């Protein structure tokens, strides 16, 4: 799938130090895709950001648009809050 980043998503990637390569990996091969509000979905994966601690990297995406648009991006240590058990 092809993705476009909103200006907000670009700003948040910089502010939150999320490397493009990690985001691209999550978008193309997420561990989970979780339905959020409206047309939004969270593409998310557990990622080691290089310091030995694992975070959940979440990309909030409107995939009803062409191309799919990443609305925002963030990492969180609150894995249990967002991870969905199947």
Image (cartoon, rainbow, N blue to C red):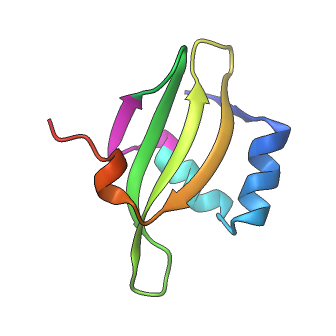
- Name which residue lies at 55% across and 15% down: 39
**Relative to 36, 73 lies left or right:** right
Above/below status of 60 relative to 76: above
**For residue 70, what is the image quadrant?**
top right
Q: Is residue 25 magenta?
A: no
Determine whether 11 is above or below 50 in the image.
above
Estimate the x, y position of residue 47 in percent, counting from the top left: 41, 65
Q: Which residues are magenta?
A: 27-34
* Image quarter in which the N terminus is found: top right
Q: Residue at x 79, y 49 (%)?
A: 10
Q: Return the residue found at the far left.
A: 86
- What residue appears at the point 85 percent right and 40 percent down from the top-left corner? 7
Question: How many marks overall?
Answer: 0
Determine the residue positioned at 77% across, 64% down.
15
Horizontal and vertical percent for residue 37? 51, 21
Could you tell whether 84 is left or right of 17 in the image? left
- Give coordinates of residue 64: x percent, y percent: 58, 12
Q: Which quarter of the rendered picture does the C terminus lie within? A: top left
1, above or below 27, in the image:
above
Q: Is residue 73 left or right of residue 75?
A: right
Q: Quadrant of residue 14?
A: bottom right
Name the one closer to the observer, 7 or 81.
81
Image check: 76 left or right of 10? left
Q: Quadrant of residue 62?
A: top right
**Residue 46: x, y in percent?**
36, 60
């Amino acid at each position: 799938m092809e993705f476009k980043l909103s200006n907000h998503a670009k700003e948040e990637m910089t502010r939150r130090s999320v490397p493009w390569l990690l985001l691209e990996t999550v978008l193309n091969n997420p561990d989970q895709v979780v339905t959020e509000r409206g047309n939004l979905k969270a593409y998310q994966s557990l990622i080691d950001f290089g310091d030995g601690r694992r975070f959940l990297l979440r990309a909030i995406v409107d995939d009803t648009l062409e191309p799919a648009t990443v609305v925002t991006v963030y990492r969180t240590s609150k894995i249990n809050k967002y991870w969905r058990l199947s």
